[in-house]
Image (spheres, rainbow, N blue to C red):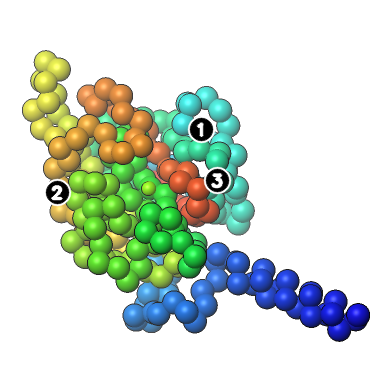
Amino acid sequence: MRCLSVAFVLCCSLAIAADDPWKLDDKLKIAKPEDTKDAETVAAPKGAIILFDGKDFSQWLKKDGKSEVKWTLKDGVMEGVKGHGDIITKDKFDGAFKLHVEFRVPYEPAGAGQGRGNSGVYVQGRYEVQILDSYGLKPGKNDCGAIYEVSAPKTNECKAPTVWQTYDIEFTAPKFVDGKKTEPAKMTVHHNGVKIQDGVEIPVDNTRAGMGGNPSTPGPILLQDHGHPVQFRNIWLVPSK
Ligand code: MG
């Protein structure tokens, strides 16, 4: 009987270890050692608007624009809570700016495609830079670093899941004259320091599951709840002069 209970406990703890989404196992093939090395955190430059410094959700609301955020917050890191929904910054942004975001995706070997480490950064709540576990894949228009359904990243710069990564997104809002769009939104994206989107013109006013709204008006930064425990730290924005 005692042997059985020991075996049961052992079995359970192994099952728990295997289910820890922040631990890799030897089933994941690592292409190069730096893929398992965290991207260095980047301090906000002078003049930056601090959107998340790990202390609290004071700059954020639920997507309804009024409810309190109830994602988890621990050790300076926020984590999406399945079903809670997307979160947005209280501030709205327009014109041109640079947005820095640090994130990591969980290790979900049982998932595939859009079902592993899915989240996203929506600029102005409208244009998604996809977050996904696309490690080692040939990237498409819906993979990590893609402007969702608009533009695949030039190269796959994903680190392994569980490893910290960075996005630096240079965004220029679309321009309108007398209510008519004269220039589309434009985006350049660096992923872990490598340029993966270069001045891409975005032909749509909203990518899938974005907030939409009048594209000539300012919009917030939105982080997506796609049901996966994606984590974020150190988010800041620098308006262009
Ligand atoms: Mg997404």
Q: Residues within 10 Å of mark 1 (few under 14, many from 20)?
A: many
Of callouts 1 and 3, the N-terminal one = 1
Marks 3 and 2, Cα distance to the nearest angstrom? 33 Å
Question: Which dot marks residue 82?
Answer: 3
Q: Position of residue 162 (x, y in %)?
A: 48, 66
| Quadrant housing residue 144 | bottom left
Residue where numbered disc 1 is placed: 62
**Which one is in front, 69 or 238?**
69
For numbered disc 3, what is the local secondary structure? loop
Near-viewer residue (53 or 221): 221
Identify residue type, mark 1.
Lys
The amino acid on which the numbered mark 3 sits, given as a three-letter code, is Lys
Q: Nearer the viewer, residue 17 or 154?
A: 17
Marks 1, 2: nearer the viewer: 1
Percent across and percent down for residue 24 are 51, 74
SS at mark 1? strand
Taking the image as shown, residue 66 lies to the left or right of residue 152, namely right
Q: Residue 130, can we see it?
A: yes
Left or right: where 228 falls relative to 189: right
Tell me residue 41's x, y (percent): 42, 62
The quadrant where residue 205 appears: top left
Q: CA distance from mark 1 to mark 2?
A: 30 Å
- 127 above or below 135? above
**Mark 2 lies on residue:** 199
